Image (tube, rainbow, N blue to C red):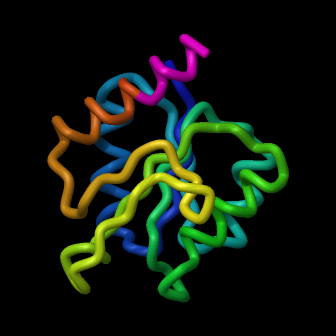
Amino acid sequence: MALIAIIDDDLDILDASGLVLKSKGHDVITATNPNDGYKIVVEKKPNLIILDVMMDEPDDGFYLAQKFRKEGIKIPILMYTSVSKAIGLDFDKSEMVPVDDFVEKPISPEELVEKVDNLLHQKEVK
């Protein structure tokens, strides 16, 4: 199956997401901050990145997604966000937010698997 990198500072989210994805046969690597997240993506070249918006700073996820794209890293990115609920903002995919899909936390295991499967399938089709 696929190698999936999860970058999130919430250990409960890392554990829960990792468990769900491993139960579907995926390999999972994790990081709890943008610097370590960047390193694991560059070194391990996962098939998919799951990235939290807010970590040490409120925009860490956006910054990291932009950095990946500027460096030519085209790995699909699923962005976890609780920002839209917290402050009432809706995000859309754009140059400023160069991710492939968004999901609102908390996410159900079924929705996570569906989003991951869709992004991995889209990557295969390209």
Q: Relative to residue 37, is residue 15 drawn left or right?
A: left
Q: Relative to residue 61, is residue 71 drawn left or right?
A: right
Q: Residue 111: percent from the left, percent from the top?
A: 20, 39
Q: Name the residue rendered at 22%, 80% in the picture.
A: 88
Picture quadrant where residue 114 is located: top left
Q: Residue 121 in magenta?
A: yes
Q: Residue 121: percent from the left, percent from the top?
A: 45, 18
The segment highlighted magenta reads 119-126
Q: Residue 44: percent from the left, percent from the top?
A: 74, 41
Residue nearest the viewer, comparing 79 with 109 = 79
13 versus 74 height, above or below:
below
Q: Residue 69: percent from the left, percent from the top?
A: 73, 51
Q: Residue 68 in magenta?
A: no
67 versus 29 height, above or below:
below
The secondary structure that dominates the magenta segment is helix
7 versus 62 height, above or below:
above
Q: Relative to residue 18, is residue 3 drawn left or right?
A: right
Q: Name the residue rendered at 37%, 25% in the picture.
A: 118
Q: Relative to residue 39, is residue 55 drawn left or right?
A: left
Residue nearest the viewer, comparing 69 with 39 = 69
Q: Name the residue rendered at 32%, 35% in the picture.
A: 115
Residue nearest the viewer, comparing 108 with 15 = 108
Picture quadrant where residue 74 is located: top right
Residue extending furthest right? 71
Total labels drawn? 0
Q: Name the residue rendered at 16%, 35% in the picture.
A: 110
| Image quadrant occupied by the C terminus | top right
